[in-house]
Image (cartoon, rainbow, N blue to C red):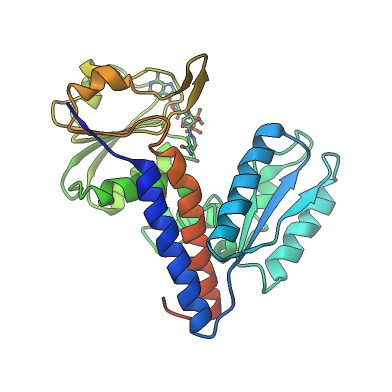
Amino acid sequence: VAGTMDGAAIARGVREQVAGDVARLVAAGGTAPGLATVLVGEDPASEVYVRNKRRSCAAAGMVDLHRHLPGDVTQADAAALVDELAADPAVSGILLQLPLPDHLDPGELLARIPVGKDVDGLTVGNAGLLAQGLPGLRPCTPAGVLEILDHHEVPLAGAEAVVVGRSVLVGRPVAQLLLERNATVTICHSRTRHLAEVCRRADVLVVAAGIPGLIGPEAVRPGAVVVDVGIHRGPQGLHGDVRFDAVQDVARLLTPVPGGVGPMTIAMLLANTVTAAARQQGIAL
Ligand code: NAD
């Protein structure tokens, strides 16, 4: 039976590390990092996500610089707020909570976030740095996947890695991060033929397809390490893209849902925010 990779525990460790970094930054004469979450409108799911981010930010000793815009804000007014935050030295990181109301253009607003304050790692600038293997702020969920693998000392150099999903948010950056670590990376997507056969090549299988139970034991090489990014709310609670119970008999290590990748995302956001603040202040941590 596979070991479980406990994302909740790993995330706690990252948060403690971040709180220590914040204290060191301040002790070195810097100022505490400030995170500006920007929420537009009243989407209930987004409200929950933003509340959790703000709470975690404060718990790590950072300054909560949350801003809330009305759902009918104009593109120009939203842009003016992003520009104000971009220019404010108290703001270390800007997180524009997506999705935005339909009348707003998210790409145009994201493009106004300076690369050094883009703690979600989702701007074209940071995606470009990642694509070229240059240092930058990495997207939080993909960074969390790598953190889980590193915590368990999963060998990546030369390993066969298969990523299911090619979204800008998850699959694509996960693949690039694995490539940066010298894995041999295959990316599967909705047009991939013989998905199970391709997945069975993997020493490390990362699944971010957004399809409940897509991956069963037939798609897993015995002894593989499997990371499940999928989150689905069903009548019996949260489920992933991987059929946990069946895959547990085949894999060596596996993330659960909930309690796997999910808790890592906010932890990596906090890590990005303290990293951004230290760089802006010219203090090495
Ligand atoms: P998405 O819908 O943007 O992308 C899904 C990707 O999977 C696409 O690239 C598509 O080509 C591929 N795909 C779809 N069907 C497939 C199939 N049958 N075979 C192979 N590939 C297929 O979704 P996303 O934003 O990348 O999110 C993926 C999942 O991860 C979702 O369940 C989402 O809820 C979850 N998620 C979790 C976190 C977190 O843990 N914090 C963060 C982001 C997303």
**The C terminus - image quarter:** bottom left
Is 107 placed left or right of 220 in the picture?
right
Residue at the farthest bottom position: 29
Q: Is residue 279 above or below residue 40?
A: below
Is 156 placed left or right of 213 in the picture?
left
Confirm whether residue 118 shows in the render: no
Q: Position of residue 141 (x, y in %)?
A: 45, 44
Confirm whether residue 247 shows in the render: yes
Q: Is residue 44 above or below residue 218?
A: below
Residue at the farthest left position: 222
Q: Residue at x 45, y 38 (%)?
A: 262
Is 141 placed left or right of 226 in the picture?
right
Q: Is residue 248 above or below residue 124?
A: above
Q: Position of residue 5 (x, y in %)?
A: 29, 39
Q: Residue at x 47, y 49 (%)?
A: 140
Is 49 placed left or right of 227 in the picture?
right
Q: Quadrant of residue 64?
A: bottom right
Q: Residue at x 43, y 18 (%)?
A: 212
**The N terminus - image quarter:** top left
Q: Position of residue 30 (x, y in %)?
A: 55, 81
Nearest the viewer among 280 and 31 is 31
How many numbered marks does the figure carry? 0
Q: Position of residue 229 (x, y in %)?
A: 41, 33
Nearest the viewer among 202 and 26 is 26
